[in-house]
Amino acid sequence: MTAYHADYAWLGGPGVAERVLIEVEGERIVTVRSGAEPPVGATRLRGLTLPGFANTHSHAFHRALRGATHRGSGSFWTWRDDMYEVAARLTPDSYYTLARAVYGEMTLAGFTCVGEFHYLHHGPGGEPYMNPNAFGEALIAAAGDAGLRITLLDACYLTGGFGEPLQGPQVRFGDGDASTWAQRTSALRAGPGARIGAAVHSVRAVPLADLPAVVEWARERGAPLHFHLSEQPAENEACLAAHGRTPTALLEDAGALGPRSCAVHATHLTEADIALLAGSRTTVCMCATTERDLADGIGPARSLAEAGAPLGVGSDSHAVIDAFEEVRAVELDERLRSGRRGHWSAAELLQAATADGHAVLGWPETGRLAEGAVADFVCVALGSVRLAGARAETLLESTVFAAGAADVSDVVVAGRPVVAGGDHLLLGDVVAALDSAIEAVRP
């Protein structure tokens, strides 16, 4: 048994507990007790200890675009062309190297689990590799090597738009039809730190006739089902023209909404869409740093939450990788939209970024500091200029609204230290790994 003693810890309430003993046996927490003295040999957790963050939505290879798409004007659609250039250059080996470094950056930022929304499946020209899951297995291996828990959300991607064929680099994404997608995805294997889920890339990329097969694949396995939803007004307009329904209504008719499902972005919704998502208990993943980077807009997060939809957060395109920036942006963007402060408490925002995010990734046993939970937790150092002056009675608020990735000092995943003193124990120099991996794939 390993004993940890935290100066402060968030145990799920509105504030923080002091002098918290956390005892871990194997991968599980067996004791959580506040107001405790440190036992002999206990590891000191300085600062504030939080459950590990869940990065509910990630495209690892998009990290290669950071800083490379900001000159001149443009839109989501022009950015997408740049993204396709990177996708065209990737091999399973180079993607493994890049993802390993990106996942290292995530763990340094306090993420202990990632939902990798994976749609790059095949070789140039759409030719399958000898191992048709070479890319997916590379991502699982990369996460394991970085000490990160992963849910590989294998995405069905069949068309380039409503009634349009895949074009250019898109042909590497496609399996031809949903049956072939299901056959390939069924060969993926979960492991101790990896689980397999399904994804519908978007309603424009999966024809209506193919949607039920993806939904059924996830339902049969009790697996998560994620999908991009209404990220752009153009997608909504095209869906209405093709089907006379919004993307949300189309997914509802296909049986895709529900407690194991996650709608990513959900930026441009009608009131009826909000009611469908909330009524089905579909989680909505907000990706604020990407949504603002791509000029997507500000989604109706408060309306969704009030209607009953759980929320999660994700760094998506990795314009930045910072768990605190993602979670506080949910509140701060709502302030910009509404002209009013105080839509969520700090504890409610942390709940979205921890337990609720883990649950919709298929890891309900983690995301909290409690007896019986998996021992995934993060320490936030309090000695930086960002947190100077923080007081115990408002420490949770100070951390959520002012801390950054650089304040993460220690990370434990499944009872195993992965980051200590700000250093990645498994990967070493993550900066050098990122530099070389990005240089190898950037056009």
Image (cartoon, grey):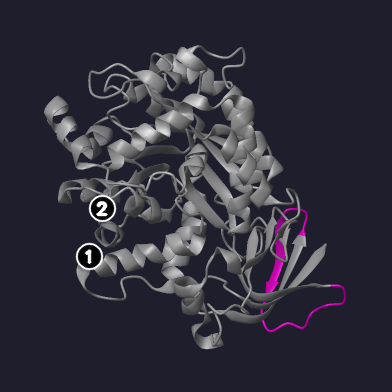
Q: Relative to 44, does residue 373 appear above or below in the rendering?
A: above
Camera-side residue: 373 or 196? 196
Instruction: Write down the region rendered in magenta.
Output: 25-41
Q: Which residue sits at x=37%, y=55%?
A: 288
Left/right placement of residue 347 relative to residue 5 reads left
| On-image quarter of the N terminus | bottom right
Name the residue nearer the viewer: 36 or 429: 429
- In front here: 78 or 198? 78
Q: Secondary structure at mark 2?
A: loop
What whole-number distance in Å separates the C-alpha atoms at marks 2 and 1? 10 Å
The residue that mark 1 highlights is 337
**Residue 264 is one of the magenta-drawn residues:** no
Q: Are marks 2 and 1 in contact (CB under 8 Å)?
A: no
Decide if residue 194 is in sight here: no
Residue at the image point whose x is 28% and y is 62% from the top: 302
80, above or below 175, in the image: below
Q: Residue at x 49, y 16 (%)?
A: 124
